[in-house]
Amino acid sequence: MNRTMHLGFTVILVAASLSNARGADVAPLEGEKTTWHDGFDRYDFVMDEGTLAIKPFKRDADERFGVKAPKKGQRRCIVVAPKTPAPGNPWSWQACYWDHEPQSEVELLRRGFHVAFITPDPDKTWDAWYAYLTEKHGLSKKPAFIGMSKGGVNEYDWTTAHPDMVSCIYADNPAIRPGAFAKLDELAKRDVPLLNICGSLDFLLERHTLPIEARYRQLGGRITVMVKEGAAHHPHSLRNPKIIADWIEENAKARGGERPVFVDETFAKSSYYSLADSFRKLDEEKSYATCRGPGFAECYDRYDATTRSPWGITGMTVVVPKAAAPGKPWVFRADRIGREPGAVDLVLLSRGYHIVAAPVVAQSGPVREQWDAVYKVLTDHGFSTKPVMEGAGASAGEAYAWAIENPDKVSCIYGENPSLRSLMTKKPPIENLAPLAKAGVPLIHVCDSLDPWLDDQTRVAEERYKGLGGRITIIVKEGEGHHPLAPKDPKVVADLITARLN
């Protein structure tokens, strides 16, 4: 923070004590102490817009829990203190409409958060207020933000301009300016999680929330969305704020952890989670919400190679489980890992498998030497010497091609509506299955009954592989075409794969 930003502060020290992350006392808050909801102590201040000086303010009694508009050239500022501050002094920054649907803030106060506010809109006064609370009074350097409607505009404006100064963002029926939308990558790069709650009948859903969600997903960021069925722009928030407060409390914490030893600084970190919808009952609203994102699904760290590494790999991707299973099993995928996770991969991640995508060179397709390099790097770091080979559609043929050249380095091969053709080898894998059968590599295919490759690829491979004494399991989904590729019950396939560990 620029030191000149707060040279004009007027600070007088008085009562409400705060603590820093180590629990030591810091400069206490000053101000006319009144009470806010549930008896929490409220402190009011006024800031001069020219000098940025902050001084205590005695508010009118008829404000009750709210706040009046400030005089020209001034900003009204508020801090509400918890009974006992939580470790690290977390706080939520209310971006607009003080005391409107305050149930989330009240619940956060009960959990040890401070709650702060300054009259809109964001400019240098917001920077000064942030400095005052963090540098003078020891609040966390990364507040959580709460913004409703225009508050969404304000919080996205300030946080995209100060992406290192925010822990998480809850936006309720928000709007966002084009400039802030264009800078969402600054938040995604810093792993700032978003929670957007919007009514299904609010026009801002289509114009703002869904574009924010699509963009943030594309950037690899963590975004959780709740769409309240049959709700319009009002009422904001949820009558029971537990979901919101739980999300903020969890995401206000630092999400650290060292990078895995097998990825270096050239790998970009992002997030990997299911995009599937779930339907959650909202008892107090007597309604339901469509929910998706990491607030309702397990979220994993993803690493993508951004430059050519010394061992010649381009485009390698690794998704890391919460805890690796014994022996460090992994899936060696023949196709790129998209933003929509594979159903089987998600089950395997939950069971401790790493998911690794092989490099694909745009001009020539898969290159065996690069795949060999990936295999060496991982096995040199203690990973299983027999990964699961996996591929969907035509990519499955590449998984087969590498496995045929390395039959002793494969635990099994899993294909979804596979075609056993390959750019990696001259001889089609479907004509060269003997090395796999000899090595005892089991094959697992999930196929749709209407997929054109079922008969001329999988059924042909089945007949030939059984003739060679190999084991092949085929699961057919009746009435389906080529898509969707995933099995109806991914756990069945995951069980077949994990059985190879036993």
Image (tube, rainbow, N blue to C red):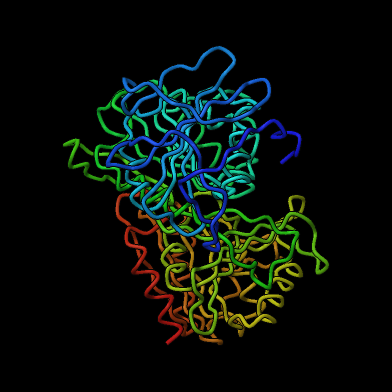
Is 30 placed left or right of 259 in the picture? left
Relative depth, front residue between 338 and 282: 282
Relative depth, front residue between 388 and 215: 215
Whether residue 483 can be seen here = no
Q: Residue furthest right?
A: 310
Judge whether 189 appears above or below 74 on screen. Answer: below
Q: Please state the horizontal and vertical placement of residue 221, each as a whole percent of the image.
A: 55, 47
Whether residue 86 can be seen here = yes
Q: Please state the horizontal and vertical placement of residue 418, each as a whole percent of the image.
A: 50, 60
Give the residue at x 53% y 84%: 327
Is 427 placed left or right of 147 in the picture? right
Is 379 placed left or right of 341 in the picture? right
Judge whether 425 appears above or below 76 on screen. Answer: below
Q: Please state the horizontal and vertical placement of residue 323, each as a whole percent of the image.
A: 49, 74
Give the residue at x 45% y 46%: 16
Give the residue at x 46% y 23%: 150
Judge whether 413 appears above or below 143 on screen. Answer: below
Q: Please state the horizontal and vertical placement of residue 156, each as a whole percent of the image.
A: 55, 32
Judge whether 48 appears above or below 423 on screen. Answer: above
Query: In terms of image quadrants, where is residue 330?
Result: bottom right
Give the residue at x 47% y 82%: 470
